[in-house]
Amino acid sequence: MALVVQKFGGSSVADTDKIKNVARKALREKERGNQVVMVVSAMGKTTDGLINLAHQISDDPPAREMDMLMSTGEQVTIALLAIALQSMGHKAISFTGPQVGIITDAVHRKAHIKRINVKKIKESLDIGSIVIVAGFQGCTEDNDITTLGRGGSDTTAVALAAALKADVCDIYTDVDGIYTTDPHICSNARKLEKISYDEMLELASLGAKVLINRSVELAKNWNVEIQVRSSFNDNPGTLVKKEDKSMEDVVVSGVAYNRNEAKISIVGVPDRPGIAAEVFGRISDSHIVVDMIIQNVGYNSRNDISFTVSKEDFAATLKIAETLCKELGAEKVISDEKIAKVSVVGVGMKTHCGVAAKMFRALAENGINIEMISTSEIKISCVIRESDLDKAVQAIHNGLIINAEPGI
Ligand code: ADP
Ligand code: ASP
Ligand code: MG
């Protein structure tokens, strides 16, 4: 008997027919003699709707209350799914994150899981129930409800698979696997049979929302093999697993994009030691993650520091930047929300050169200007205008994947 964790995202449970469909998927697994733990997201775009409600009242709603609000979305789905399974004549029980002992730190809206007490889940599995857990949520040691960051139901699923030592962790979604890029932007994207944790971690961190990066990090650390597959057909999905030798033959395995970043520049910052530490120290004290950073060459003993943050953190970061600008005697702060980031990823880049030049050429041939660049051993990212994004993803995907010469 295997223990199977199945996670279903928002589009897979968007209405009651879809909830009945995922109930049947779990039943099939149960009828094969396996134990089943389901993790589900809020229905469709419910979480966006809840956030929108809060913003109709306040521009800056308190994070604790946002968690209280957002966590209700998943609670609706777990109850409806348990009702669906029971009405089909099967034992099923729903639990919120706090009820199954998902204990997190107290960083509201992006909490990290500290531990999970699996006793309650195991007891329910042992009496033959399908266990349904609300994704995306947990609670602090003091019983305050927390959420794990947008897309966090993936994290719940992988964390539960690790804690329960599950045999299978299937992430069901609206596409039937991980593709060389978002198939909704490039119709010629190719499905991957497998991808290494490191490549998937980069793709996810760079915006490929098919898996949230924290879930991949957990999977890597706890050696949980994930299969990403479709809620709507039985096609084999994509395995996310340890790197093997054959994966290195592929130079560029994927193209990712992110529309969810904004750029802030502090212009005319005095050029002296310790300034960057002061700026980025203050931002990280507010639990804000900075992505790209560029410091322009100094003039008149002054520099411009530009950096990007996620759009959720934009308002808070702008406030910090404006305070810093005054304190440091800088000239002004400029912000820009109309940017996007496009990236290529591949472990083969460790051993092949020329990828950056090809990427820049694909952008240049399409008249797309590059505003920021960053690289690591297995990725290259460029910030461009948001309006150029679809064209950029298609050009890079065609140039570096579809029409790639062997070895580049
Ligand atoms: P869920 O609601 O199931 O969590 P998400 O919307 O978060 O689903 O993630 C699935 C979406 O990820 C797909 O519909 C697709 O548009 C997008 N996506 C982005 N990059 C990729 C990729 N490389 N492969 C597959 N899907 C991708
Ligand atoms: N419902 C949450 C969100 O929309 C979590 C998730 O779907 O994974 O971000
Ligand atoms: Mg998701």
Image (spheres, rainbow, N blue to C red):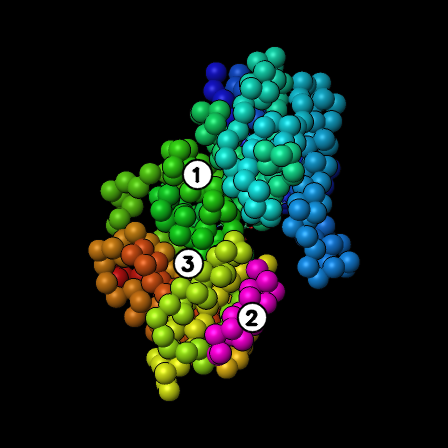
What is the C-alpha distance between the residues marked 2 and 1? 36 Å
- Residue type (three-letter) at the residue carrying disc 2: Thr
Which image quadrant: the C terminus? Answer: bottom left
Tell me the quarter of the picture where residue 405 sits.
bottom left
Q: Name the residue nearer the viewer: 234 or 208.
A: 208
Question: Element at badge 2?
Answer: helix
SS at circle 3: strand
**Range drawn in magenta:** 313-330
Residue carrying label 2: 323
Q: Nearer the viewer, mark 2 or mark 1?
A: 2
Where is residue 220? Give x, y as percent: 38, 39
Identify which residue is drawn at 68% across, 52% down.
62
Which residue is depicted at the point 65% across and 31% down? Answer: 96
Magenta stretch, main secondary structure class: helix
Q: Is residue 13 visible?
A: no
Is residue 56 visible in the rendered image? The answer is yes
Q: Earlier in the sequence, mark 2 or mark 3?
A: 3
Left or right of 375? Residue 227 is: right
> Residue 365: x percent and y percent?
39, 77
Mark 3 and mark 1: Cα distance apart in space: 22 Å
Residue that label 1 marks: 218
Q: Please provide percent x and percent y for residue 317.
A: 55, 64
Density class for disc 2 (Cα within 10 Å; few <14, some 14-19, many ≥20) is few
Is ligand 1 less than 8 Å from the beta carbon at label 3? yes
* Dot in front, 2 or 3: 2
